Amino acid sequence: MAKLIGTGMKRVDAPDKARGVAKYAGDYAAENMLHACLVRSEHAHAKILDIDTSALPEGAYCFTAKDLACNVIPFIFNDQPALAEEKVRFYGEAIAVVAADTLEAARAAAKTVKVTYELLPAVLDGEAALAPDAEKVHEQGNICGEFHRGKGDPDVAFERCALVLEDMFEVPPQEHAYLEPEAAYTYIDEKGRLCLYSSTQNAFLDKTGLCQVLGLGADQVVSRAATIGGGFGGKDGHTIQIFPAVVTQKTGRPCRMTFTRKENLQASFKRHAARAWAKMGFDENGKIIAFKGKIIFDTGAYAAYGPSVLSLGSEHFAGPYLIENTQIDGYLSYTNNTPASAMRGFGAPQGCFGSEIFMSKAARILGIDPLEIRRRNVLREGDLGAIGQRMDHSVGLLESINKFEESDFWKKAKADTSGEYGYGVAAGCLSSGFGKGVNDRATVTVEKTADGYTVYCGLVDIGQGSETALVMLASESLDVEPEKIRMVMADTELTDDCSSTAASRSVYIAGNALLEAVKEIKKGKDKGVGHAVFPENELDSFGVHTLYGFIVQGAKVKIDPVSGAVNVLEVHNVTEAGRILNPVSVAGQMFGGIVMSTGYAISEGIHYRNGVAMEDSFASYVIPTSVDAPHITSENIEAYEPTGPYGVKGIAEAPTVAIAAAIANAVMQAVPDAHIHTLPLDRTEILRHYKKEGGVR
Amino acid sequence: MNVLRAKNVSEAIRMQKETNGYFLAGGTYSMVEINSERFDPDCLIDLSLCPELYGIREEEASVHIGALTTFTELEKSELIGRLFPALQKAAAEVGGPQVRNRGTVGGNICAASPAADAATPLLALDATVVAVGVNGERKIPIRKLFLAPRKTCLTPDEVVTEIILPKTGSRSGFIKVGKRNALAVSSINMAVSAVITDGKLTDVRVAAGSCAPTPRLCPRTAACLLADGLNAVPTAQEILMEEISPIDDRWATAEYRRMVAKNMLSALMQEMMEEKA
């Protein structure tokens, strides 16, 4: 009998955070601690001729590539040095770590380090980078990855379409904008081990990085996640961890480093900028006959998670629809822009922006309701997706559309004949898990204690609420009060490697492992170790996913007649995430994802001038404030995923996939003549076509 | 960096002479510049203890606004709202509540940002800036105050003590457009004031911000409107295009600024002509 499942149990981490006692990496300190900062590249692309540290003041330390055992950050492609040595490939790239007794002294010392460069032409556009004669960012050329999949014959199929839409779409880099900037603290413990507390999404990968770069053995490094103030993908991989660690390794002293917001905006990972060309053909009833798409993701100077983003983004490009004829071509290019890596949605929002605009445009041209045209094309259980992946799980898109149609939001939208507002909808799906062939597993240990149970899990609660979810699952399955559950997470000494806290997988994979461990306890053991492996489909090819969450979203907008500004007044959301473990938590994810992507739609974006991000503070990088965020309502449909813990699916990223398109579609209803194909939505184009009488309503 | 606190304006001027320091009002500009290492003064002279810089005072023909009057005070002032709605509206749209609680009208104009929100309404309302320095007091028409981005005609020793607004019985309005609805730098802003007698315009001023190196009056645009009121708006919009010189920067493109400036002019004129006298 379920007691906690489906309840809005309060977050277990909330009291400490609310009282200010939660300890973030930047809160750690010790008496003889050194403060560190970076000497960063002043150019987007240049050879390093010399690093002169002769003016370094007394008491300050400076470490460069020469001080590292192995100057390669372990990542998918191993293409990034921890500290630039022969050349710099983006503005703000780390060249040297400088440490001193105070932060002020460290910053002053960093200014004495003189780097001599020989400038190289910078590659600043993801498409231009692919030209055969483009300057090379890396020796092997600028093509970092390619993706080519499809089925049927779209070119032939377009011939028999009643309507073919074709356009180019362009979206900018987006910053994660977590409240807590990157931070790490390192020290040597009483056993002589180098210990790290960091703001991270993967304590185990951090340990691998420290071991490799510093030349330390697995038993010489302990890595732990501190309390994390938001990640959204941006803290998955090396951001800052190695820098204080090299100081501690060389000096034996504790060391702390925190990036400024300027460093975060100008030099940390971003969501990939992308340019996409899409062609979509429909029959007269709105059935999609064919889809052809090409998308170029700009991964910046280093691959990071770019190859996976390329794959997932391409996989989701055509949307959550059943399409017989598809061809999807994706390219990942190296440029001298800030490296792009994981960000919530992981490549899907870039492509879905165009395909979801086409769905509403086709509905308008063919005279079909925008929900109905989506209903006629939904993927159902057992169907094959755009690149042939089998929907072998709970698929609740149709139910979500039906529920959305019954909502007050949509009823009011249909009844509104004032002409003052624009309404738009979009649908989307987002995969959960790493995809076929990528090692996606978790091991969770449950131990009986004097007064309850301790759960050991290698994943991180980055603010998304996984700790609370796991407490709920443990409490429910062990039939004890949640207060009896103690969580130990993301500690390479005490927990097992569960890989990244990413890919909307934490509660699903760790939940399954936890339930396996509980089975052992229920057999009478004091300690249970549970393993879980993410399911894969036989049919699928490498990287393709087998489990998706679904959303339908609608936006109500008002265009400011003077400025062309898009005011997003309301958003309604319907989610299918299997069984809902904690509806408050899910609503939190939906609200957060919607606000994050409302910013993507209306105001965010990094603009580079000679490779330098012009947006260097939250004054110029404009995220929505409380008066810009829409009023949001969110519902869930009742569903059950047989492979998930208590029927649960991952859903943290899905709300970012389609909302920019829903807002764009609302704008196009208000200003039908505007050519909307870029983000943030182009106020100049909106103004050019805005007529006071309003849109088509 | 030293921080001195002056107890009155004459002490502040003396301290400046001795230290060559910079005056600090609310700090919402200077402190951001200092913290981001774009401004590195040896000495700051805090004016917040100077009693003569506070208060809004009504006289027969004018209203005197102390230089350290905060945007919150302007926003909440019944007097300002009644006589100078453009200034009240501009004050209400500065930054967010925290910035409005600290930011001052004197500091805003002395920082001389091309996007200063208080500058355009004060230009449209024909304000006079009173400054006191080593050589005594100067009354400067605000249209002569701004010389270049971040540069005024004030000498380093001069403290702006108050801003005088004439009571002309004008109607006035202000529109600001930023990248979001709060905590936004003006991509462009505009204020218009007009004296309207029996439906006829007898005095018009148009001021624009963020579309020239300094906030500026657009006298030819105003003259055109004066002649023919609402009917003149299309012509006035074209003249306005010659009187502003916007650029592309991270806040907006020049093209966008031009489109919005035209819309602002017609919206503000519409608003004022429709307003009940």
Image (tube, coloured by chain):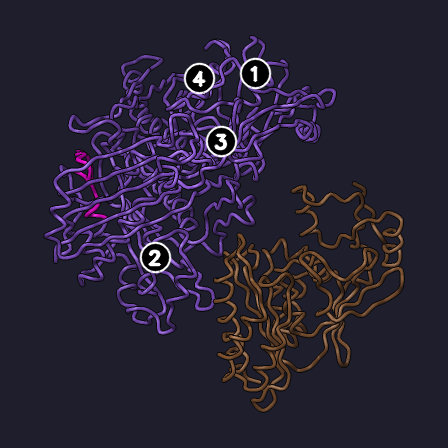
Discs 1 and 4 lie in a common subunit: yes
First along the sequence among labels 4 and 3: 3
* Image x and y of residue A563, in percent: 47, 64
Q: Amino acid at mark 2?
A: Ile
Task: Give the spatial CA distance, label 1 vs label 4.
Answer: 20 Å
Mark 4, residue position: A208
- The secondary structure making up most of the magenta span is loop
Q: Are marks 4 and 3 in contact (CB under 8 Å)?
A: no
Q: Secondary structure at mark 4?
A: helix
Which residue in the structure is indicated by mark 2?
A: A676
Residue A643 x %, y %: 22, 29
Residue for badge 1: A66
The chain holding disc 3 is: A
Q: Which chain is purple?
A: A
Marks 2 and 3, how far apart in space? Answer: 33 Å
Residue type pointed to by label 3 = Arg
Position of A569 compared to A436: left or right?
A: right
Residue shown at the point (82%, 49%) measured from the top left: B21
Q: Nearer the viewer, residue A403 or A245?
A: A245
Question: Looking at numbered disc 1 in the image, what kind of residue is underneath it?
Answer: Lys
Q: Is residue A489 left or right of residue A368?
A: right
Residue linked to disc 3: A89
Instruction: Identify residue type, mark 4.
Output: Thr
